[in-house]
Image: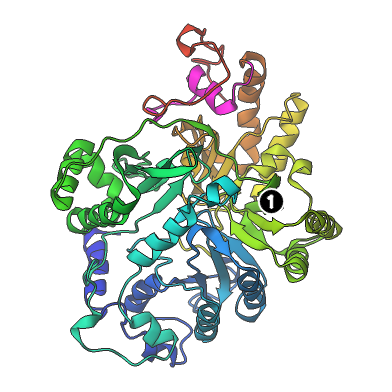
Amino acid sequence: MTSIEHSLVEQIKAGSGFLRGTVVEELSDERPSFSRENVVTLKFHGITEEDDRDVRSGLPTGASPDVIFMVRAVIPGGVLTADQYLAFDALADQAGNGTLRLTTRQAVQFHHTRKTDLSSLIRTLNEHLVTTFGASGDAVRNVMSCPAPFSDRTDTGLVTFAERIADHFRPRTRAYYEIWMNGERAVTAAVQEPLYGKTYLPRKFKIGLAFPEDNCIDVYSQDVGIVADIRSGSLEGFTLLVGGGLGRTHGRPDTFPRLADPLCFVAPDELLEVLTAIVGLHRDFGDRVDRRQARLKYLIDHWGVDIFKDALEQRVGRRLADPKLLSWTGADDHLGVHRQDDHRWFLGVPIEAGRITDRGDVLLRTGLRAVVERFRPGIRLTPGQNLLLTDLTDTARAHVTSTLEDHGVLPAGRIPPVVLHSMACPALPTCPLAVTESERVLPEVTRALQAELEALGIGEEGIRVRMTGCPNGCARPYTAEIALVGRRKGAYDVHLGGSTLGTRLNVLLAENVAEENLVSLLSPILATYRDGRYEGETFGDFCRRSGVGSGERADRGDQFPVATSDPIDATDRPQSPIHGATLP
């Protein structure tokens, strides 16, 4: 897209009448699609127009595409009730393709929705107290929070903060209710947005909350990462990190993934005020000409953190405290059985690539429905595209596990480690940005990689693999130990060396690697890892120490020390034999 086309998005927002456009009029016409202007407007409503490229390839030349829609719900912290989950499950058949897609931001997507089903889908979700407003578009997106409901964590109310932040930053226009809930159109000044204004933000804005030492939400990948400071079970405040974001564009070296920097420390009652000021700075100074330079990370990169903090302090009218020193000991997705409190358990259920469906002998969707209908657990969606069933009694826990296994759903401990820890975006056939496959080929790729690890005698290693169909980073590939980033049809750029703790970006190893050559490319590196690793050293850390790949690697480990049981200082270690090797 050219700069002129990019600025057109700003013009469309400005002329949309606070996100109304002519959506109502076009909903009632017979066309299966919307105008370009309304396609932009509808993203704020959680709706993305797509077409099925599998179907497209079989259409006659010049035929109109088979238009479908993706609809995304807003679920702060990934928290759902049993009734809400069952409503999603029913709607998957009524208005989707019979599947539910869990996202890496703890939300749910419906795919293959037709234009004629949009109104009933959104209205039904809202009847169950779930909105789609703000799930996409240039506003604050779904607010993430660590989903694990350990009793000492729930007392600090982090999920409640996620809900408050989501409510605070939801657009105030009545357009959503007028269009989807048959409300009367408001024409007074009250329709104006007190925070966003008529053009909203320059680009999307992502916020996530993490507990100390547990980086399951990839806090450094957020526009604003919020890390709780908890002392003796009491919430003292939050360290704020700014300027994270993983999207980039092939052929645009001025676009890049970036990890967030430490900014300040705030008390709980300061959080919303300071967040509002940060969002305001992005609104006022973010790039509104080139959308590929419009994320907050580029503003931070251009200004520097010190200048940004000065501007922030001017807005809040006082000096802000320095950020706390952070450390991390884990970043897992809380899978398997865990004690929730003295009387209850929660169970983390693996969902490969986030797709809840019945496929072959694995009746995942049917099994989950049976469990939720019978035992009425709480539901927590995870940042790793998985799902937690919470509030289970001893009896319920045993029955839930057996019911899922009866439906072919294996527990986490029986799933190969590489498969268990993998992630993928939907990509083809529906995502408009995808250049190649991701979700549909991930199972084959991860199982081939797992087989190679087992042949090397290291099959127990839970190496983190993330796959995307384009460079935009929806599955957070650039912090993974192995990232397979779509370059062209059937080929991927391979990145290595991210941290299992989410504190380091990986670097490029090879470009344009055909899908069938991915495992053979990685095999000699994995063999060298087996022979040259230190005790307890992860594959990503080994790659970093060994100098695998090219380019600079952003690392937050210096500012935020990583807890480790390894007593050997990295500076005393010899280089791995892989350093400087010519790779196939």
Q: Position of residue 335 (x, y in %)?
A: 67, 46
Question: Is residue 470 in sight in this rendering?
Answer: yes
Specify the quadrant that holds the N terminus: bottom left
Q: Is residue 337 above or below residue 213?
A: below
Does the magenta segment cover residue 104?
Answer: no
- Residue at horizontal 69%, vertical 45%? 338
| Nearest to the observer: residue 355 or residue 168 | 168
Q: Position of residue 516 (x, y in %)?
A: 65, 41
Q: Is residue 97 above or below residue 265?
A: below
118 left or right of 286? right
Q: Position of residue 215 (x, y in %)?
A: 50, 40
| Nearest to the observer: residue 368 or residue 168 | 168
- Residue at horizontal 43%, vertical 25%? 561
- Residue at horizontal 64%, vertical 56%? 387
Specify the quadrant that holds the C terminus: top right
Q: How is the image coloured?
A: rainbow
Residue range of the region highlighted in magenta in the rendering = 535-556
